[in-house]
Amino acid sequence: MIDEQAKARLVSDFPELEDEGMIPQREVFAHFGLLFHGFALLEHELINIVTFARQGQDYRAGKLSDEVH
């Protein structure tokens, strides 16, 4: 269990935890979903960075062209 001071800090960050109709499981899954979504966005952005960096290197090396055929 958490002490009253830790609970007060938690409620100050997430005031919805004091609502009477709050379902703890739903809150946990909602915050997990947000965190998972954030990591998925970060992963995809890293993929984009690597892809564009490699294409830039290929373009500078003359392996790619910006001409339309």
Image (tube, grey):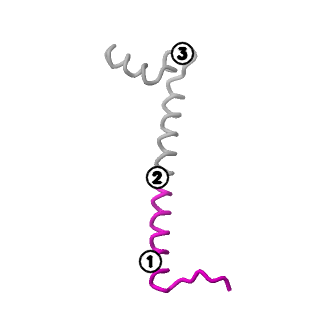
Q: Earlier in the sequence, mark 1 or mark 3?
A: 3
Residue at the location (34% across, 13% down)?
Answer: 4
Measured in 3D between alpha carbons, the distance from the residue under mark 1 to the one under mark 3, in whole angstroms, is 55 Å
- Which residue is label 3 attached to? 19
Check contact, mark 2 vs mark 1: CB within 8 A.
no
Measured in 3D between alpha carbons, the distance from the residue under mark 2 to the one under mark 1, in whole angstroms, is 23 Å
Position of residue 51 measured from the top left corner of the image (x, y, whole percent): 49, 69
Q: Earlier in the sequence, mark 3 or mark 2?
A: 3
Q: Which image quadrant: the C terminus?
A: bottom right
Q: Which residues are magenta?
A: 42-69
Residue 8 vs 31, above or below: the answer is above
Kind of residue indicated by mark 3: Asp
- Which residue is label 2 attached to? 42
Kind of residue indicated by mark 1: Gln
Residue 48 vs 42, above or below: the answer is below
Q: Choose mark 2 or mark 1, whichever is in front.
A: 1
From the viewer's side, name the closer residue of 4 and 41: 41
From the viewer's side, name the closer residue of 3 and 63: 63
Measured in 3D between alpha carbons, the distance from the residue under mark 3 to the one under mark 2, in whole angstroms, is 32 Å
Residue at the location (51% across, 39% down)?
Answer: 34
At mark 2, the secondary structure is helix
Say if residue 1 shows up in the picture: no
Say if residue 3 shows up in the picture: yes
Residue at the location (45% across, 59% down)?
Answer: 46
Q: Choose mark 1 or mark 3, whichever is in front.
A: 1
